[in-house]
Amino acid sequence: MMLSAATRALVRSAGRRVPSAAVLAARRTMTCSTSVLASSSVLSSPSGSKRFKSAEPIAVDNDIEDHGGLFDDKPFNKIMAANRGEIATRIMRACAELGVPSVGIYSHEDRFTQHRYKADQAFLLNTDKAPVAAYLDIDYIVGICKKNGVEAVHPGYGLLSENADFAQALCDNGIVFIGPTVDNLRNFGDKTTAKEMAIAQGVPVIAGSDDAFASVAEARKWIEDPANGCEYPVIVKAAMGGGGRGIRIVPTPEDLEQQFTQAANEALNAFGDGRMFVEKYVETPRHIEVQCLGDGTGEVIHLWDRDCSVQRRHQKIIETAPSLGVPEETRNQMLNDACRLLAADNYRAAGTVEFLVDKNGKHYFMEVNPRVQVEHTITEEITGVDVVQSTMKLASGKTLKELGLTQDQIPDPMGYAMQCRVTTENPAHDFRPDTGTIDVFRMPGGMGIRLDDGPGFPGAKITPHYDSLLVKITAKAQKRKDAAAKLVRALREFRVRGVATNKSFLLHVLENDEFLSGVVDTGFIAANPHLLEPLKEKDRAQKLLHYIGEVIVNGTPKSLGAVGPPPSVTDPMIPVLEPKPKTKPSLKETFDKEGPEAFAKAVRENEGLLITDTTWRDAHQSLLATRMRTVDMLNIAEANNVALANAYSLENWGGATFDVSMRFLRECPWDRLASMREAVPDIPFQML
């Protein structure tokens, strides 16, 4: 069913009268499919399988017209972000800025996440698949594209981003893959082929095996062959994949079997291929990478370099652009080597060439990542080049020259940019991913801070199914230390409650003197175990709200003495007593006006018995574990003041009273005394 004429007229009117940015923002709030859906209609997957009810009021097709010429040169008419989390949101925002309707995909487990609602259209993936497998279902994703007029697909990073079969399937169905060509993916996705290409182009490589080994015995035989020039320590690396998985350092021959087996099993589970390469291990290296763009014609440019040396178990933690302390000769060689290597394969789209730099300033080729990187943000900040939009335009057939992106048009780095990845990992428990519901999510801001957010918002459910990345925070400043200071400030402003994060770890790194000096190697974190110490945050507001909510919903906690049967439903009767005319000053008045000697004399001369009433201290301590609240005492204070006008004293104070008032009743004992004295002005108070 299509939109009514009246609805279309309203939408078109909004498109003409409201600034385009506002119209696009309004569109982002809609969950769209190819037809209007009633507020409680059932959302169906492309195969028609029903899974859950939608809570959205209306979903509309996006044919808003008239953007005032803002989007005259759109690269495509509809782009799918074939990913999830923050990178899917990043792609959709790039689409919005280009005036291109975006399409999202989501698993059942991701049905409430942000990337679904940022898209102009969103489609449920195959519910018969596991949470991750749903995003890897090539046939299903291609089917969504064909049925809904998707012209191009951006894969982001991870998942299917380096899958040549996915790119080929799209190509076979007339859909553009926004990324490298199929040949690029096959060549650089295979580490052996990539290494051979690097050698052919004269790029320095580390001594290592040409073939990947399926067994420990094969690897050991190759290492022990003197002709290969590869002595211990060595490093074993997965034949496929990346992201720090399937990599182990092997210090001695005795360690080979254990480390090889662990890495192979990890690679097999993550990438479906357990074969391992062996390389000479470069000790205390720096990890420097070069961001490149190619247009498929042999033209390739660099967007300068990034320092990714701050790593934990081969996972990047904090990245900086440009790198500091790298000899200029080495930097220029890496930039030239990266461009020459990719140009030799007529590379298209964004790609990163990664190098190791040893302590002598010599660089070695590691690998090519044929995709957008997580840390592309810092390159964008120092160059002003939108890497994601550039990939879309290049995929549409534009050349670098047509886009104004020739090397001579790329500026020198404009200051420094630094990115940290906030994850739902707990440093105190070996970075184990945490799960749960986010109670508080307050993002930082301010000059020089960029946020690339994904699954985080108040009420969000963090599941164990996916990567733990919550948000990327990028800071930009003229000096590297100033960028670090901005990140520290942003992290301290950032509030996440309900799940653990790695925030304390990031702060420890950013405030470390060695890190701030700018020159650290990949062993920095391992050499500084104190960086893992947790920070203690008070979280006062949440604790108070939790306590109030607990009392309102479940009543007073048993720790406050709320045990036994419920109290009587009969309200206590407070006597109403008329004050008697004074025939003489009270003992309190005597003490205040004439002092302690006059008070003692009045006591001795008193005719009859003088009593001390202990109801306000001893009685409720014995009967109610000292849990009587101030308000309950004040309710009978007026009657006490009349009935006990001639008493010697009221005992209302003691160590237990003070302690309970503070710790259990959450009341100020000094305020209690002041309130009592105001309500009972004529009777002396006594402490136990």
Image (cartoon, rainbow, N blue to C red):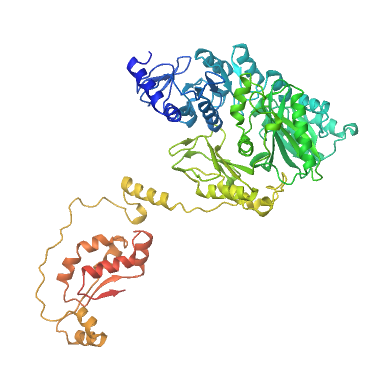
Q: Which of 503 and 448 is in front in this view?
A: 448
Q: Which of 484 and 51 is in front in this view?
A: 484
The correct choice, above or below, for 136 with respect to 477 in the image is above
Farthest top residue in view: 173
Q: Left or right: where does residue 593 sit relative to residue 460?
A: left
Dividing the image into 4 quarters, which one contains the N terminus? top left
The correct choice, above or below, for 661 with respect to 140 in the image is below
Q: Is residue 191 visible?
A: no
The correct choice, above or below, for 145 with respect to 573 in the image is above
Q: Left or right: where does residue 559 sit relative to residue 104?
A: left
The picture places residue 349, in percent across and down from the top left corner, at 66, 25
The picture places residue 185, in percent across and down from the top left corner, at 69, 22
Dividing the image into 4 quarters, which one contains the C terminus? bottom left
Q: Nearer the viewer, residue 120 or 227?
A: 120
The picture places residue 320, in percent across and down from the top left corner, at 65, 42
The correct choice, above or below, for 512 with respect to 341 in the image is below
Q: Left or right: where does residue 391 sit relative to residue 566?
A: right
Tell me where residue 35 sits by quadrant: top left
Q: Left or right: where does residue 429 sit relative to residue 660?
A: right
The picture places residue 354, in percent across and down from the top left corner, at 72, 34
Count the marks: 0
Residue at (73, 37) in percent of width and height: 248
Q: Can residue 472 be seen in this view?
A: yes
